[in-house]
Amino acid sequence: QVQLVESGGGLVQSGDSLRLSCVVFGRTITTENMGWFRQAPGKEREFVSVIRWTNGRAYYVDSVKGRFTISRENAKNTVYLQMNSLKSEDTAVYYCALDQTPGGPRDYADAYEYWGQGTQVTVSS
């Protein structure tokens, strides 16, 4: 059974940094895409970033470009989201997700078959 386990969230101040981690259990990631989404209270789940496991190419929503970096560590079956220069509007529950269909990448939630439980990121201004 595939399980995604996130960690690294917390309460920080505006301008601070956090690194989120997501470990995939039950499956060795090879050709899939791994994404990060977030959901703020009262809002829809929003695409943040995705990485193609095959070549490491990364894509971001415009609001985080230049501040967030997605990366992968093949040996640990882990994807990271380094978040710098955090803003209050980044406050949300962050989810990692696995899109098992080769190709893409895709920036819509319905494309992802497996999801983590979420980790809270709170940025105080």
Image: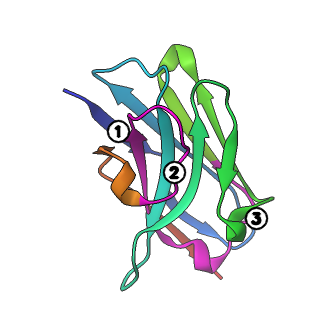
Number of the front mark, 3 or 2: 2
Q: Residue at x 43, y 47 (%)?
A: 96
Tell me whether the residue at label 3 lies in contact with that at label 2, contact meaning CB atoms closer than 8 angstroms.
no
Whether residue 15 is in magenta: the answer is no
Q: What's the distance in space between the residues labelled 2 and 1, CA to CA?
A: 21 Å
Tell me whether the residue at label 1 lies in contact with that at label 3, contact meaning CB atoms closer than 8 angstroms.
no
> On the image, numbered disc 3 is attached to which residue?
85
Q: What's the distance in space between the residues labelled 1 and 3, CA to CA?
A: 24 Å
Q: Position of residue 119 (x, y in %)?
A: 40, 55
Q: Quadrant of residue 70?
A: top right
Give the magenta part as a residue range.
82-108
Q: Which of the labelled discs sits on residue 106, or is there none?
A: 2
Task: Mark 1: give few (<14), some (14-19) or many (20+) Cα within 10 Å.
Answer: some
Q: Is residue 6 above or below residue 25?
A: below
Q: Is residue 119 visible?
A: no
Report the front residue among 95 and 62.
62
